[in-house]
Image (cartoon, rainbow, N blue to C red):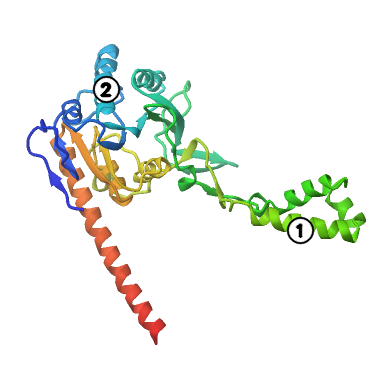
Amino acid sequence: MSLHVATRNFTSNTMQKNIIHLQDCVAGMLALPSKSVDIVATSPPYNLGIAYGTYKDNKPRQEYLDWLGKVFEAVKHCLKDDGHFWLNVGYSNIDPWVGMDVAQVAREHFVLQNNFTWVKSITINDVTTGHFKPINSDRFANPTWEHLFHFTKTGAVPCDKLAVGVPYMWDCNIDNTGRIKGRLAKKLGFKDIKDYNKNATTEQREKFDIEIANKIANQKPKADSRCRGNSWFVPYDTIANREKHRGSHPATYPVALIEQCIKFSGISSGVLVDPFMGSGTSAVAAVKCGLEYIGFDIDAEYRQFAQDRIADFETHDARELAERDTLDQKLSLFEVI
């Protein structure tokens, strides 16, 4: 997957892929063919006075929400009818309603199919895992989570929950044989399986064994994992140099978070759009998941960092694949020997 760079505004209804356009996202998305995009994943400015490079993050509230309404309308234009729109909005104690206000604007164009909480840090049994920005306040708790809204056009788009599932802890959750035996024992008139084991006649046991064999043979294979729910713990990677790994962008999220969104959506190929590409996280996640991407940003410095980051990842990814192929070839030689 090669990286392309847009040097002028994108105004025609074409579909250039693997590209970051240096332009306003509303005009850019409206220039895309209607219903051409599989997934949109993004995090817009939060209007909290964050120090972005070009964008001024301090609009009057209604002006901010009206502007996002135009963004969401453009998202709806380019998103397929069975597409997915993932919207991350941060939480702030100084403006606790901003995430919900933004979601209400999106509600005018989409259905909220799932409402996730992105957990950045959590404490269990007095042990804290993950990262968060502490605040010096005697009124507010440290914010350790953010909104992650999953919108679709109908609210009825199938997802692949088990693509990001978690393994069952107990084997009995996978093997239903015990439950089947218990129900069949009661059907034969016994109190429970223990009563059956103690008192069943030879004829009853023969009938029992035949029915059990038939039921097990006709069972659909059960997955060895379950849905992880709508609280997603995805911590930031621990890094030594923020500028090197995330650039000068002040508000980033982990690649793993967008990977999880893509996998949950059940999309293994297609196009991802990020209207606010920023440091390129969504594009890297798209490449990792085998998708193509289209990004927009108005900050030339952010776009340059994103381009370099994507190129570095693709180079590293290609090197890893080559090394893996070489190792596989060596292993196959040993198998032949």
Is residue 247 among the parts visible in the rendering? Answer: no
Camera-side residue of 159 and 69: 159
Residue at the (82%, 45%) spot, across then down: 187
Residue extending furthest toward the left: 8
**Tag 1 residue:** 210
Marks 2/1: CA distance?
60 Å
- Nearer the observer, disc 2 or disc 1? 1
Lower sequence index among marks 2 and 1: 2
Give, as a three-letter code, the residue at label 1: Ile
Mark 1 Cα shell of 10 Å, populated few (<14), some (14-19), many (≥20): few
**Tag 2 residue:** 73
Report the disc number at residue 267.
none
**Residue 10 x, y percent position in the rendering:** 11, 33
Left or right: 257 in relation to 207: left
In which quadrant will I find the C terminus?
bottom left
Residue 307 position (above or below residue 135): below
Is residue 106 among the parts visible in the rendering? Answer: yes
Residue 327 position (above or below residue 290): below
Question: The residue tagged with tag 2: helix, strand or loop?
Answer: helix
Q: How many marks?
A: 2
Camera-side residue of 246 and 178: 178
Residue 57 found in image quarter: top left
Question: The residue tagged with tag 1: helix, strand or loop?
Answer: helix
Residue at the (31%, 32%) spot, across then down: 43
Camera-side residue of 143 and 99: 99
Left or right: 301 in relation to 65: left
**Residue 50 x, y percent position in the rendering:** 27, 27
